[in-house]
Amino acid sequence: MRGLGAFNADTLTVANAATVRGVPALTTSRRAHRIPSLTHDVLDWDDAGSSETGPGQRMMISGAWRRTASGAGLLAADGSVTASIFAEMSALAVRTGALNLGQGFPDEDGPPQVLAAAHRAIRDGVNQYPPGRGMPILREAIARHQKRFYGLDLDADTEILVTAGATEALAATILALVEPGDEVVTFEPFYDAYGGLISLAGGIHRTVPLRAPHFQPDLDELQATITDRTRLILVNDPHNPTGAVFAAETLGVIVELAHRHDALIVTDEVYEHLTFGARHVPISTLPGGWERTITISSGGKTFSTTGWKVGWLSGPAALVSAILAVKQFLTYVNGAPFQPAMAVGLDLPDSYFTGIAGVLRAKRDTLAEGLLRAGFDISLPQGSYFIVADPRPLGYSNGADFCRDLPGLAGVVAVPISAFCSPAHRAEYASLVRFAYCKSTDVLTRAARNLRALTPT
Ligand code: PMP
Ligand code: GLN
């Protein structure tokens, strides 16, 4: 079995690293960087930053890339940058033909009305730059959505900003609001972009652990981590990768601590409609929440259009304007024909939104049952696309090694939870792996069957 390249900088195994790295790296021979890209989402930076100073020679390239990659755990020991775990695992699935339960994207199309609206918009000539804050038709639909589901009254002109996915909303928000040396608190494990963006902004990343089996934070630890040095509290709820939905008490404590320490709250709610018990509660709806919170979401998960990259944020007008000041120089704008299509999606009837949660819940149950039957310990997620499993009962104590071997053992790809952790905390999560269940029932059923191959006989 070939290695996967690096899961992280400090446990780098390089058997296949050449297929996934090569950033501004350090060997300047073009030949050394001529890397066949496996899929279009494998990093394809083979010539980036190289110079012609001679084969095998090295040069230092200064700039923010290094701390960004380091913050995301993607800086290898030799100074090169590895692909994200998601790109790497999708490439592994392509290479091995294994079922891809690694990267969190659906393998079926979303609502036909939404897809048709995008076709129509392209045909109707909606193909040039939209306004900097986003097309009014989409901002108004976002405002209606926030009112319908959460009772929030938003001014579509000043309190909403359309972005290139939740990722750009996170980037613009963190870059706009964090000064070098400010602390940003997240839970851990955390979505990889958080570590990269906090470091890019020069912030200091502090984390509060989420522990199996329920992955709810300890409120004393939360309280101890949020201090007067905290600038932002970044809350991903429902949570990737653990599937946790945070208790109302936790959300209330976050608001209280933000007030006490004069911190701002940023929420990442991309899985807002994908909960399986209690309905999602945005922090901005809590008493004292709105005035300190930037709420971020996107249409990728809700409408199975992860490739469209249409996201948005909302919050008090002054904060939104500050974020716009940065956002306008990241992408300026994006996705003109997809914006009216997203508006169609956001206006779909309630039955659509409850329907997708119901379908996903059944998929979660299919995969959970398969994992249990195969012999894993699991934590049953209350939301999101992901289920955390522990293969220790099957004799595997290292999740990264296990994921490396899993295509060969069972024809399935998963992602190690350690890829969502800072180096100092990886050991605590070493055995755990994440499986995505946002896949067709057929794929999940086959994966569940394949995983039985792991069961000791
Ligand atoms: N936040 C979380 C928690 C995610 O899982 C993802 C992945 N979709 C994103 C943000 C990025 O969202 P988008 O694709 O809209 O940029
Ligand atoms: N959000 C997706 C996941 O967690 C992947 C997004 C990405 O590839 N950056 O799997």
Image: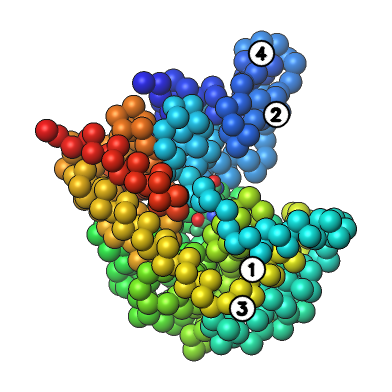
Helix or strand or loop: what does disc 4 sit on?
A: helix
- Looking at the image, residue 97 lies above or below residue 55: below
Type of amino acid at the residue the image marks with label 4: Arg
How far is mark 1 from mark 3, CA to CA? 10 Å
How far is mark 3 from mark 2, CA to CA? 42 Å
Type of amino acid at the residue the image marks with label 2: Ala
Q: Name the residue under label 4.
A: 31
- Relative placement, left or right, of 125 versus 19 is right
Quadrant in which the C terminus appears? top left
Q: Name the residue under label 2.
A: 48
The count of marks equals 4
| Residue pictured at 36% horizontal, 32% vertical | 411
Type of amino acid at the residue the image marks with label 3: His
Do labels 2 and 1 touch, CB within 8 Å? no
Q: Which of marks 2 and 4 is nearer the N terminus?
A: 4
Closest to the camera, between mark 3 and mark 2, is 3
Q: Mark 3 points at which residue?
A: 145
- Relative placement, left or right, of 118 versus 2 is right
Closest to the camera, between mark 1 and mark 3, is 1
Do labels 2 and 4 touch, CB within 8 Å? no
Q: Where is residue 52 in the image (x, y as percent from the top left)?
A: 75, 16
Q: Which of marks 1 and 4 is nearer the N terminus?
A: 4
Characterize the local packing of mark 1: few (<14), some (14-19) or many (20 or more) Cα atoms within 10 angstroms.
Answer: many
Q: Earlier in the sequence, mark 4 or mark 3?
A: 4
Helix or strand or loop: what does disc 1 sit on?
A: helix
Q: Residue 345 carries which label?
A: 1
Closest to the camera, between mark 1 and mark 4, is 1
Q: Nearer the viewer, residue 169 or 227?
A: 169
